[in-house]
Amino acid sequence: MANPGRIYGARRRKNDPKDAEFLARQGRADVTLLHPISHRSSEAQKELAMIRARDQLVGARTKLINHVRGAVKAQGGRLRKCSAEAFATRATSELPEETRAALIPLLDIIAGMTATIRQYDQQIEKLVATSYPEAARLMQPKGVGALTALAFLLLVGDPTRFSHSRDAGPYFGLIPKLDDSGESQPQLRISKAGDELGRRLLVSAAQYILGPFGPDCDLRRHGLKIAARGGKNAKKRAAVAVARKLAVLLHKLWVSGAEYDPDWVLKHRAV
């Protein structure tokens, strides 16, 4: 099977019959024009379904928390900052009396969501410990937890699908689009190809590395150097750049079995 999204280019009129005919013509002209696709195993799909369910639950909890904060603010009150895990307990004692009847049921739902998310996290940690021991190797860089490591393994599937570890960055859509024409080389946004959840987890890990609690390592120094250039969205560009380097690093750790070197970026400037 071939991946039509890789060879269509600017084609916009697409449907199943047209797709099949186009791929057949491409294969007849030159089979190397086709890009094969790799299917994930049923086991990987099952584990990914759990990770995606957890992600949906986290998103729904965030929306409910924002609604509660907004409802309290509309009444002239304000809830103190706290983690999402502690929000239901903390907010219960801080709700204004006029909003309690409407918002207490939502806090109960948020508390239930938090408990379910915690159960998902326990399942993920158990999977890493029992079924995916290679994920522990990917958790060596600070900021990469069990969730990110397991999602990376499942989304890539077969580490040998990449001829070079640097192909992991484009796989998650962490490189800029290209639309060069003559002397025009516009600066475009990242391609955002591949899995959105995997890309978001890598960027989240990169943001931790660049944050106040991030460890002193070359990944951090690489990102801070980009952010120091200033300009519009400098911090976002730095996080994406670190996320791309992190994807390459995780694949390298996976296939090589090597120990994590905090100065890895410095020694691999070409990736």
Image: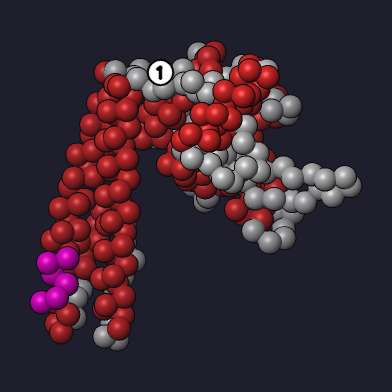
In this rendering, the answer to whether 78 lies above or below 174 is: below
* Residue at 61%, 19% in the rendered image: 27
Q: Nearer the viewer, residue 29 or 47?
A: 29
Question: How is the model colour-coded?
Answer: secondary structure
Q: Which residue is mark 1?
A: 134
Magenta span: predominant SS is helix
What is the number of callouts on the image? 1
| Image: magenta residue range | 101-106
Q: Nearer the viewer, residue 163 or 14?
A: 14
Q: Is residue 172 visible?
A: no
Q: Quadrant of residue 34?
A: top right
Q: Nearer the viewer, residue 169 or 228?
A: 169
Q: Would residue 145 appear left or right of 263 to someone viewing this image?
A: left
Q: Is residue 133 visible?
A: yes
- 15 in the magenta segment: no
Given the current orientation, which residue lies at the most extreme right position?
Answer: 183
Q: Nearer the viewer, residue 206 or 218?
A: 206
Q: Position of residue 102 (x, y in %)?
A: 14, 75
Q: Quadrant of residue 153?
A: top left
Q: In what quadrant of the picture does the C terminus appear?
A: top right
Q: Position of residue 128 (x, y in %)?
A: 31, 24
- 104 in the magenta segment: yes
Q: Position of residue 58 (x, y in %)?
A: 30, 51
* Residue at 21%, 68% in the rendered image: 91
In this rendering, the answer to whether 16 lies above or below 106 is: above
Q: Would residue 107 appear left or right of 158 to someone viewing this image?
A: left
Tag 1: amino acid? Glu
* Residue at 41%, 22% in the rendered image: 39
* Residue at 29%, 35% in the rendered image: 49
